[in-house]
Each structure stands twice: as structure tokens, then as C-alpha cells.
Amino acid sequence: MMPVAGGQTGDVEHPGLHLLRSDDRAAEVDAFVERVGPRVGLLGVLGDLDRRAKAVRVPAPAASWGFRWNQEDTWSKRWWPQGISSRADAAEEDLVDGRPVLVTSSYSRTVGGVHMGARLTFVDVADRSDIRYRHVLLVEPVLREDGSVGVRPVPVHAGGIVWYGDHIHVAGTRRGLMSFHLDDIVRVPTGDASRLRIRDRAPRTVDTFGHRYVLPVRFTYDARTAEGVDQLRYSFASLDRSTTPYELVVGEYGRGRQSTRLARFEIDHATSLLRADDDGASVPTMLTGDGVRGMQGAAVVDGTWFVTNSHGPYALGSLWVGTPGALREHRFRLPMGPEDIAYWPQRDELWSVTEYPGRRWVFGMPRRHLPQGR
């Protein structure tokens, strides 16, 4: 049986699935940057935060404090927040240029016949009275045979994200993971907010759905399965820093007859990428079907799992605590619509984000105030 966290065993003898990393798309990214650039990286974004959030009381017993987005983002019917990570996942030092930084992900619903893909939002939470943030659009550059450069949106649900090293890995459900290098963040001219397009003919323009900053995909971790094995859905993701080596934690949102599997993959500290075998495949160190229905996110701290569960837009959410196969539900501890969850070790806090229009919060939860145990 396959070993899993906490000294338990998984429910399968062989996973029958793995992630296969694609080639680095350096040529496409470089051509894209040359056409629309320049690269400004994360510091360029943090030096140009254009929106303000407001610290508020989050209506949930587990939340110690949190904030809500500005009016436009709180009520948007297009952009739906999903994933969360922080600088605390990325490095031992949880500050960027002296500031604590959160990052969330959102996916776009089709509005007015336009689907904008997915984006990241970087938030400076150093000053609770002056919380600032900015959106960065995720894009896929295309290098055509004639040498021209095109661009496409990244149509993933972005249900979970992990910021580790200089990379951000975005959960892509059945696709696996999509990976981005933060040095590749590009500042572009402000263009048409209704389209994504690079026009090489005069007048030469760049349109990025109104976003000033974009981040092109570098490579993907493509989901692969053996014959007869159901493909794992990468619905959410987090980082477990309490193991050696660190591990990526992923899982499936499932209802009805859908599976609710949880899995773990080792991370190579030297590269900040998933550890792979000689064939380039990343195989889970744990795979178990002992998740819970409707899981939205899972984080692991010292062997204890914290799993979020939504009950829709009007009822408070649940927090499940324990280990796979022995998770205990603690109802009405979270706000309405909780999604992904991440751990901030320097603060000993778990952080989550909610999705529903008018009920969108980002909030921290002191671990000492949460149910404990295995």
C-alpha cells in the first residue's frame, strides 16, 4: 500500500496517475515580451498597486480579521475568486521588499459573449488601514510560423494556487497544473478592455481586457492516467511546509458520485518544481479517496488536515479537521462560499477566500483557535 501523511496508508496499491511537465515555453515568452514588454516582475506590480481593499469584520467564528475588495470586484459577475497563497509559501522570509503579500486567483465567467480566462491578484497587507492590490491577467503566448506573436486567455478554473520560489502553480482541474514564473510579468499599454489581441499591423496595439500587467504561462504539468484509471481533477492546491521535503497538496471537488481524492507530490527545493523521475513524471507520494463531498480546499500543518466546505451563498461554511478517512466536520465556522485555503507559518494562521458576489472576503484564522487533532 502507498504510504501517506501521518503514517497511514492510501486506498490504492498503485496510483495509476502522474503529472508530466511540458517543455519550457521560453521562446514563446521571449517573443511575447519583445513584442509587448517590458518585463517588470513582481516588484513592478507591487510598486503600482491601483486598487484598495477595506479591512472588515468577516461574518464567521473562525475568522480573526480580513478584508473585502473594492465595490467593483466585490460585486463582479465576471470574476470569481478561488485560490489563495502568500509569500509565506514562497520562501522562508514571508516579506517581499519588506511587505507581507497575499496572492489570490479568479476565473472569468462568460459575460456579454466574452470569456477572459483567469487572473492573479497581488495584495499588500502590511497596513490594515491601507490594503492595496492589483490584478494580473494570465495569458498564453503563441509564436506563429511566420514569426508573428499571438496571445490567448488561460481558460482554467484556477481553484487553487501555490506560490513557491519564483513560480506560481495554478490548478487547472482536468488539465493538471499551469506554471508561471514571476519574473515574466509584463507591463503593457492600456488597451481595449473588451478583447485580448496583439495587432502587428498599423496601428500596432496591445489589448489585454483592460489589464496593465500580464503573466505568460511558462510550462504545464499535464495530468496523465493509466488505462482504466479515472483522471484526477486538480480542483485546489496548497503547500505543506511541515514535511521534508515540502509537498504540494491537491484534491478534488466532488458531488454525488464524483470521487473526492486527495494527493501529495514532493517538491524539489533546488528548482521549486515538482520532483520528477527519470522519465519526467511526477508521481504522487500519497493518493487516497478519503476526502469529503464538496471540498473546496485543503491545507496540512504538522499532519493535521484543514479542509473547507461550502454550503452555498447564504449559509456559513464548514471546516473539516483531522486526517483523510478521519476528518471531522465543524459546521458554520467559515463565511459563505469558502474556497481554497493556505497556511502562513510565521503567523500560525490559515487563510482563505470566498467567491460569491457581495459576500467576498479574504480572511485569516489563528490555528490555535481552530479545532485540532488527527
Image (spheres, rainbow, N blue to C red):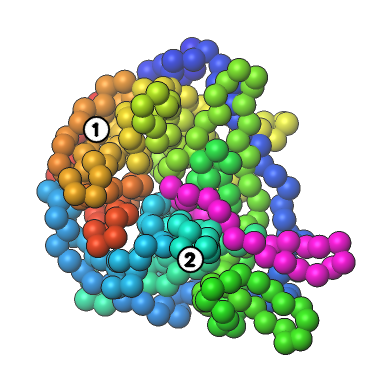
Does residue 148 lie above or below 328 as drawn? below
How many marks do you count on the picture?
Answer: 2
| Residue at disc 2, secondary structure | loop
First to last magenta residue range = 141-168
Query: What residue do we see at 46% from left, 63% from top?
Result: 111
Expressed as whole percent of the image width and height from the top left, the position of residue 351 reads 29, 52
In depth, the one of 218 and 116 nearer the eye is 116
Does residue 80 lie above or below 133 as drawn? above
Whether residue 229 is in magenta: the answer is: no
Distance from the alpha carbon under mark 1 to that under mark 2: 41 Å
The residue to which callout 1 is attached is: 321
Expressed as whole percent of the image width and height from the top left, the position of residue 133 reads 38, 72
- Tell me if mark 1 has few (under 14), some (14-19) or many (20+) residues whose alpha carbon lies within 10 angstroms of its own: many
- Left or right of 359: which side holds 41? right
As drawn, which residue projects farthest toward the bottom?
203
Query: What residue do we see at 40% from left, 80% from top?
Result: 50
Q: Amino acid at mark 2?
A: Gly
Which mark's residue is nearer the viewer, 1 or 2?
2
Query: What residue do we see at 40% from left, 23% from top?
Result: 257
- Tell me if mark 2 has few (under 14), some (14-19) or many (20+) residues whose alpha carbon lies within 10 angstroms of its own: few
Expressed as whole percent of the image width and height from the top left, the position of residue 256 reads 36, 26
Q: Amino acid at mark 1?
A: Val
Residue 242 is at least partly visible in this image: no
| Residue at disc 1, secondary structure | strand
The residue to which callout 2 is attached is: 112
Query: What residue do we see at 59% from left, 60% from top?
Result: 153
Residue 313 is at least partly visible in this image: yes
